[in-house]
Image (cartoon, rainbow, N blue to C red):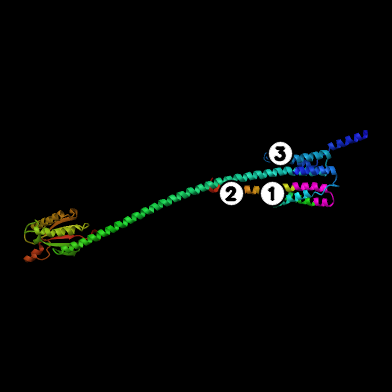
Amino acid sequence: MKLVGWLAMAMLVGCGTTLPPPGLISARAAFAHASASRAAQLQPTQVYEAKQALDAAEAKFKDEGVTPDTKDLAYVAERKAQYAEAMTDVTLFRQAYEQADKDMRALTGKQLENYQQKLAEQQADLEHQKQLTEAEKTNAAQARADAEKEHAARLEAERRMKQAIEDLAKIAAIKEEQRGMVITLTGNVLFASGRWELLPGAQIKLNEVGEALKAQKDRDITVEGHTDNQGTVQTNLDLGQKRADSVRAYLVSRGVDAGRITATGIGQARPITDNSTAENRANNRRVEIIIAPAKEAR
Amino acid sequence: MRLAWSFTALALSASVGCGSSFPEPKEAQIQTESAVRGAQEVGADKDPQATLHLKFAMDQIAEAKNLIASGDNHRAEMVLMRAKSDAELALMQAKAHSEKADAEKAQAEVADMRRKLGK
């Protein structure tokens, strides 16, 4: 009986000093690692299961020492600790993915906002361009209308000029020269001999001339007074000047622009024929109204 | 549940002895093989660690079948328990591998978008 007791004690002492199998040591380390990691907070159930598995392995080792079952349980305990950490990794990677997804949605929203802002700016530019185009169209239409109006006015002026010249041709000689259109009025019709005041009949003729001249707003007009060679040169020059002045004054009174019309005394200097006969001298006594060519034509 | 199953197996082991009259662990085999298929479906072959544990699981299932054939049902059940823990670990490691790839891809896209927006 005493021997049995000693044997039992020896067995107990022997079991107490048995080293744990490497698998159990690994399982302990794996569990320590898992319980110190974020698995403890994120996967407490799995860590708890790993702890139970380790406890089972420890109990088996305590009860039976190093047996195949102890090794199996230690193996399972190690895997369960690793499983808890792998599940923690899944959770952490999932969280990282969700954060990235959230960031991407925020950035996409920002990008969309940028696109919308650019689009709004482009639309504003487009609207501005459209308005400019409309304004240009309006201006172009106005310019066309102005040009047409001006053209019509020019045609009307030309028509009136043509009509006036046709009317003038009935009462005066008209000819085209280098210096312009020359309207020649016979002196006998306009003035009494040696005088420069206009005769009443002269005014009727000059009214026709005035109407024609008013139609020529862009042309300069010169009134020249010519005489025969009776009397002195100076006397004839003065008489020519006075007669030209009289005609100019009358035309201005009829509405011809004073700034466009000048009066010049020529006297006997430029006869159109010799003064040998009374008829010739009558022809030399005259007033010439020269309408210069249009300014753009010169 | 798994623990309960394990402890039941242990209790049976202790009471019956060395598998002499221990029942064939059909349920454990079904569960383990199911865990292996789960790991394969998740893509355990794409992660080295998961591949290794999947191989352990498959080798252990083969070992358990041999043990069953030789009549050692108790050892077969214990080996199947190891195999199942490997298969489950392989499945979770494969999931972690997949989640990591997804997260890294999403983070790269965010970084790319930030570069584009000049932030």
Q: Tag 3's secondary structure?
A: helix
Q: Residue at x 47, y 50 (%)?
A: A119
Left or right placement of residue A246 versus residue A68 in this view: left
Q: The N terminus of chain A appears in which quarter of the rendering?
A: top right
Classify mark 1: residues with Cα within 10 Å, few (<14), some (14-19) or many (20+).
many
User: Which sits in the foreground, B107 or B2?
Assistant: B2
User: Which sits in the foreground, A101 or A263?
Assistant: A101
**How far is mark 1 from mark 2, CA to CA?**
23 Å
Q: Earlier in the sequence, mark 1 or mark 2?
A: 1
**How far is mark 3 from mark 2, CA to CA?**
34 Å
Amino acid type indicated by mark 2? Glu
Label 2 lies in what chain?
Answer: B
Q: Main secondary structure of the magenta part?
A: helix
Verify CB contact (< 8 Å) between mark 1 and mark 2: no
Q: Tag 1's secondary structure?
A: helix
Label 1 lies in what chain?
Answer: B
Amino acid type indicated by mark 3? Ser
Q: Which residue is mark 2?
A: B109
Residue A286 position within the rendered picture, expressed as x and y whole percent measured from the top left: 11, 61
User: Which sits in the foreground, A23 or A39?
Assistant: A39
Classify mark 3: residues with Cα within 10 Å, few (<14), some (14-19) or many (20+).
many
Q: Tag 2's secondary structure?
A: helix
Q: Which residue is mark 1?
A: B94
Label 3 lies in what chain?
Answer: A
Residue A22 position within the rendered picture, expressed as x and y whole percent measured from the top left: 79, 42
Say yes or no: labels 1 and 3 on the same chain: no
Report the disc number at residue A35. 3
- Give the magenta part as a residue range: B63-85
B98 over A32 or under it: above or below:
below
Q: Between tags 1 and 2, which lies in front?
A: 1
Verify CB contact (< 8 Å) between mark 1 and mark 3: no
